[in-house]
Amino acid sequence: MLKKILSVSGKSGLFKMVSQGKNMLIAESLIDQKRIPVYPRDKVISLSDISIYTDEEEVPLSQILSVIKEKENGKPIDFSPAIKPDELKSYFTEILPNFDRDRVYPSDIKKIMIWYNLLINTGIVDFEKKEEGEETGKTEEKEPNKDE
């Protein structure tokens, strides 16, 4: 589910990939549903490609979001924008006790919490589900064109 949800450097919030052109993507903001072009020069990352460092291995963001969802009973996290770094670390310790405290910064934790709230508020609640139909549909559309 998170494969088409994007973080675009320099833009606040998250975006859903709507379509793909020759030299750009069209992304729709999850906040206000405005569409923007995203060019190759923009730093873009899919949420499905993000992992969190732990003492042993990296844990995919989808698993972290699922644990937060379970802890919060599917509701948004209630926190103040002025939350202190120690409070962020304390909260995240409940989510992922063995996260690497040297490489996961309070700003990263806060961003994850903001992203979680944004996803929940827009109805994206199944973080680990894979979108097989959409990927297969694209492949099927491209294959006949390649064969002709």
Image: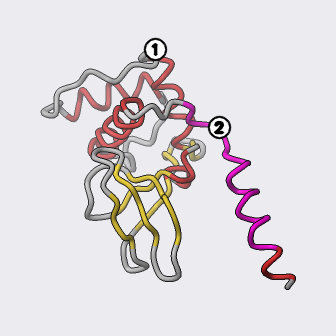
Residue 12 image offset from top left, x and y in percent: 26, 53
Three-letter amino acid code of the residue under disc 1: Asn
Number of callouts in the render?
2
Q: Which residue position holds label 1?
A: 73
Residue 139: within the magenta? yes
Residue 33 or 106: which is nearer the viewer? 33
Residue 79 image offset from top left, x and y in percent: 23, 24
Residue drawn at x 47%, y 23% is 69
Q: Residue furthest right?
A: 147
Q: Secondary structure at mark 2?
A: loop
Residue drawn at x 85%, y 85% is 148
Residue drawn at x 53%, y 82% is 22
Residue 122 or 99: which is nearer the viewer? 122
Q: For residue 119, what is the image quadrant?
A: top left
Q: Which residue position holds label 2?
A: 129
Q: Which residues are magenta?
A: 126-143
Residue 129: within the magenta? yes
Q: Quadrant of the N terminus?
A: top right
Q: Is residue 54 above or below residue 71?
A: below
On screen, residue 52 versus residue 93, left or right, reads right
Q: Is residue 14 above or below residue 39?
A: above
On screen, residue 141 versus residue 47, left or right, reads right
Three-letter amino acid code of the residue under disc 2: Lys
Q: Is residue 46 above or below residue 26?
A: above
Residue 121 image offset from top left, x and y in percent: 36, 30
Q: Is residue 143 above or below residue 46?
A: below
At label 1, counting other C-alpha atoms closer than 10 Å, the crowd grade (few under 14, some 14-19, many 20 or more) is few
Label 2–label 1 contact, CB within 8 A: no
Residue 6 image offset from top left, x and y in percent: 44, 55
Q: Residue furthest bottom?
A: 148
On screen, residue 33 versus residue 47, left or right, reads left
Residues under labels 2 and 1: Cα distance? 18 Å
